[in-house]
Image (tube, rainbow, N blue to C red):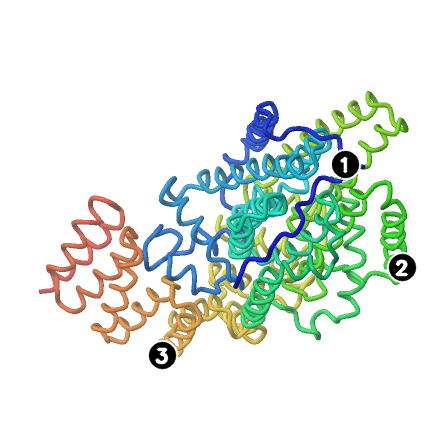
Amino acid sequence: MSVPAAGARPTIDQSEAAPADPENGAFVAIAVVIAVLTFVLYWSAIGNGFVAYDDNEYVTANAHVKAGLSWSNVTWAFTTTDVYNWHPLTWLSYMADVELFGLGASGFHFTNVFLHAINAALLFWLLLRATGWWGPSLVVGVLFAVHPLNVQSVAWISERKNVLSTLFWLLAMLSYVDWTRRARPIAYAGVVAGLTLSLLSKPMAVTLPFVLLLFDYWPLGRWHVGIRRLAAEKLPLFVLVAVFCVVTYRVQAAGGAVAAEASIPIGIRLGNAVWSYLAYLGKALRPAGLAAFYPYAQPPLPLWRIAIALVAIAGATAAAFAVRDRARPVLVGWLWYLGTLVPVIGIVQVGGQAMADRYAYVPLIGIFIACAWGAALLVRQGLLPKAVALAAASVLVVTLSLRTVRQIAVWRTTETLFLHTIRAEPNSWVGHYNLGVAANRARRYEEAITRFNETIRLAPNFADAYNGLGSALAALKKDDEAIGNYQRALTLNPRLAAAHNNLGIALAARGEVEAGLEHLRQALALEPDFNDARLNVSMCLRRLRRFDESLAEANRVMEAMPRSPIVRYQRALTLVDMGDLDGARADLKTLEATAPATAAQLRAVLDSRAGGR
């Protein structure tokens, strides 16, 4: 595909610009300072841990990520549709973290913070190069850096895709500005590469070609060449976006992430979309009560609230168009906000949330542009004293920074995150569910049962809650109730591998080994890398005296988890039953060096077998 010509070299729209030389060393220093101060602001996030909210799927329970970079794992990253998305570059970034920092949470947090800091500096640099206005560019970069609504994207390890995708988004826009000025093919190739890498990190970047059209209007001043020509020169970008849209929808639909019409009717989704446009603005202006998950309103939003939101959005749009001759940045910023939210506004519903802070990461840039340039134009026209504008901006930045530091602390652990979430959103079934998961892991089973029951009350069709409830009941030896809840979970979601695994264990424990083995096999069919399920298959096969098969499964798990004491112990038990005591003693020797308590259990088994002979 040939590179389109840029046409006549455009210039900054001087009717609205106060040019500054982007090559000035002082502006480079400002970009560096923005990055450093952003990193310092988010420094406390590096001390946070993993949270039981997708971090297990992305990192802590993901065998491919934990194994680091290898050719096989690179291949997996480009072929997997785990977590209902195709974002290979995000997977590779996690693997790179493992290579650089190991498996601790701090390394993953460091990368997220680093990327956000670079994004803030790049945003300032992009706007400076495109407009020549260093003051508003600085304000936008700093607001983006410190706004609490962006904390979810940075402090949540699982949202690496957002900060990584935005990095390439901004680099693509910088290449575009260069291409429109110099018409170099290498610059256009940079745009295509940036968009591709952004999409490979997160498919939300599908709106980037439309944002470039907005940039053609302001600040690049290129609309005089005609909208058809501007659209035609971006044809390669639109084709790329179309391909990714199809791939993403198919992946999410196949994984069950796209909500069915019956679960969330289109009328409710449309009403929520209109309201969300206003709600995101509200959280931008007053970032209080931020939560990890916002459920759909129950009962649904009343029509009068939707009507108010619709009138407000329509009024703001009309006002932005009305001032376009005097304040083009206001119109461009507002349309940036409206347009970049479209993929995640919920008309095509992915997941169960009504809205999410992370979805505002790129869209809020448009609001910051509208506000910063709007204020700058008022100052320039003498309608706003410069001292007042500077004082207001300073107070705003300090206030937002303090809120951001508090919000970062919310993400310290699973419990701090979701206790805060249910304080902000008492009906957040995701909050109650994850507190149940945390209680289960801490062996506070009665508390877990309470949390899971509350989740089921709020979301009676959420299969994972029944599975969690079953596991808590099983820990309390209430096996029949546990099995009933596992079966209910599988009725709601037959593809829930964890429920198949748990049901398989429960059935085998009460003597129904063949039935249990069938469910364990189904768990593996759904998730071939589910090592716990594979180890349970090995144990069941051993009970059925199918020792060769049991050993083969145990060896496969051992390849994936070579340092696991429980895997080595279970394999040794199979070797004992096969009469291979030398092989079992070799495992004992390894366990004595790595897990003395487990080694003592195995030694007792070996001594018993030797004594029996």
- Graded by Cα atoms within 10 Å as few (under 14), some (14 to 19) or many (20 or more), the crowding at tag 1 reads few
Q: Nearer the viewer, residue 420 or 147?
A: 147
Q: Nearer the viewer, residue 600 or 465?
A: 465
Residue 577 at x, y = what percent?
18, 68
User: Regarding mark 1 in the picture, which secondary structure is present there?
Assistant: loop
First in residue order: circle 2 vs circle 1: 1
Q: Is residue 571 visible?
A: yes
- Graded by Cα atoms within 10 Å as few (under 14), some (14 to 19) or many (20 or more), the crowding at tag 2 reads some
Residue 47 at x, y = what percent?
50, 34
- What's the residue type where badge 2 is placed? Ala
Residue located farthest toward the front when viewing the structure as drawn: 8
| Foreground tag (3 vs 1) | 1
Q: Which residue is mark 2?
A: 307
- What's the residue type where badge 1 is placed? Gln
The picture quadrant where one finds residue 452 is bottom right
Q: CA distance from mark 3 to mark 2?
A: 58 Å
Q: CA distance from mark 2 to mark 1?
A: 40 Å
Q: Which residue is mark 3?
A: 514
Residue at horizontal 64 percent and vertical 42 percent from the top: 150
Q: CA distance from mark 3 to mark 1?
A: 78 Å
- What's the residue type where badge 3 is placed? Glu
